[in-house]
Amino acid sequence: MKTVNVHEAKTRLSQLLTQVEAGEEVVISRAGKPVARLVPAARKKKRNFGFDTSDWEIPAGFDDSLSPAALKDFHKPGLR
């Protein structure tokens, strides 16, 4: 973990961000006391549809409690 003072952080922000993107943490201090920490932002992983290869099946009667109108909506063309 790298520690820099406020002046250095302002001067070298672009370089520090490059280091943070590479996984390094940077602490910014004022008068020798830590006041902030730069860490990589959490990025959502892209979900790949159809990736689940496990075997599963829909139990018989799982939709018995649905109204006829709701069932009709589930079976509209193009909703798959």
Image: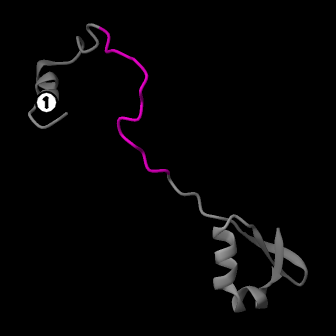
Quarter of the figure with the C terminus:
top left
Quadrant location of the N terminus in the rendered image: bottom right
Left/right placement of residue 10 relative to residue 52 reads right
Residue 70 lies, in percent from the top left, at 16, 25
Q: At x 16% / y 35%, what residue is drawn?
A: 79
What range of the chain is rendered magenta?
A: 45-59
Image quarter of residue 34? bottom right
Report the side of 78 relative to 15 (left or right).
left
Which residue is label 1 attached to? 73
Find residue 73 and report its image quarter. top left
Q: Main SS type for the magenta part? A: loop
Of all residues, the one furthest to the right in this rendering is: 32
Which secondary structure, mark 1?
Answer: helix
* Above or below for 2 versus 79: below
The amino acid type found where label 1 is placed reads Asp
Q: Is residue 52 magenta?
A: yes
